[in-house]
Image (cartoon, rainbow, N blue to C red):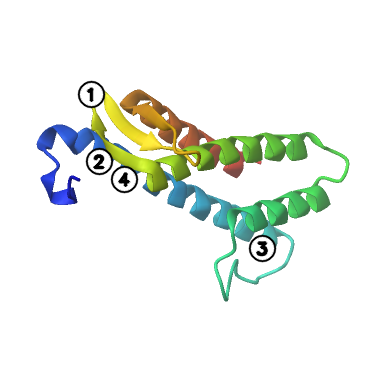
């Protein structure tokens, strides 16, 4: 078993990529909370998002969907975009959970993970970068709704 201090400089790209994935997810959460805050303010509501406890992404997306439905009663295109964003977020969240909870060890070109069924999977650095880019794209699409 390798400890975190045993990682070599060659593993820096891997560690940086995992950190970028976690940060990108947090930034997506913040973007969603900001979007809901802007919609609330535009509707005359000045409550803060999650004043007592931090709501889950599912609750935030439900609130966003409700507010957009109230705002655009005759135009369903925004609701279709929200549904597409939710699908992308769920896929990326499964990938993020695989990385965060299933990380095993570095391998050439990426790293090994174990999924929920204990299957060993190889994740390339390209896949990791692609998911980070997808997360950033979802955040931009979310703000555009």
| Rendered location of residue 20, percent (x, y) | 34, 42
Q: Is mark 1 on a helix, strand or loop?
A: loop
Q: Residue 41 carries which label?
A: 3
Q: How crowded is mark 2: few (under 14 residues within 10 Å), some or many (20 or more)?
A: some
Alpha carbon separation for disc pair 2 and 3: 39 Å
Disc 1 marks which residue?
108
Q: Identify the image quadrant of the N terminus.
A: top left
Q: Nearer the viewer, mark 3 or mark 4?
A: 4
Q: How many marks?
A: 4
| Rendered location of residue 29, percent (x, y) | 51, 53
Q: Do the residues labelled 1 and 3 touch (CB within 8 Å)?
A: no
Residue at 75% across, 49% down: 68
Alpha carbon separation for disc pair 1 and 2: 14 Å
Q: Do the residues labelled 2 and 4 touch (CB within 8 Å)?
A: yes
| Rendered location of residue 76, percent (x, y) | 82, 37
The answer to whether 43 is drawn above or below residue 23 in the figure is below
Disc 2 marks which residue?
15
Q: Residues within 10 Å of mark 4 (few under 14, many from 20)?
A: few
Q: What element carries label 2?
A: helix
Disc 4 marks which residue?
19
Alpha carbon separation for disc pair 2 and 4: 6 Å
Q: Residues within 10 Å of mark 1 (few under 14, many from 20)?
A: few
Residue at 31% across, 40% down: 104
Q: Nearer the viewer, mark 1 or mark 2?
A: 1
| Rendered location of residue 2, percent (x, y) | 18, 45
């Amino acid at each position: 078993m390798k400890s975190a201090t045993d990682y070599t400089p060659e593993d820096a790209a891997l560690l940086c990529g995992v950190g970028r994935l976690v940060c990108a997810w947090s930034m997506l959460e913040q973007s969603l909370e900001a979007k809901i805050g802007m919609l609330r303010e535009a509707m005359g509501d000045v409550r803060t998002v999650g004043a007592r406890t931090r709501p889950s992404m599912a609750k935030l997306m439900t609130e966003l969907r409700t507010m957009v439905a109230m705002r655009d009663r005759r135009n369903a295109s925004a609701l279709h975009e929200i549904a597409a964003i939710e699908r992308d977020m769920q896929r990326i969240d499964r990938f993020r959970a695989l990385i965060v909870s299933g990380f095993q060890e570095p391998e050439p070109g990426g790293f090994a993970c174990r999924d929920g069924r204990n299957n060993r999977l190889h994740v390339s650095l390209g896949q990791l970068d692609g998911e980070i880019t997808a997360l950033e794209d979802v955040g931009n699409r979310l703000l555009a709704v």
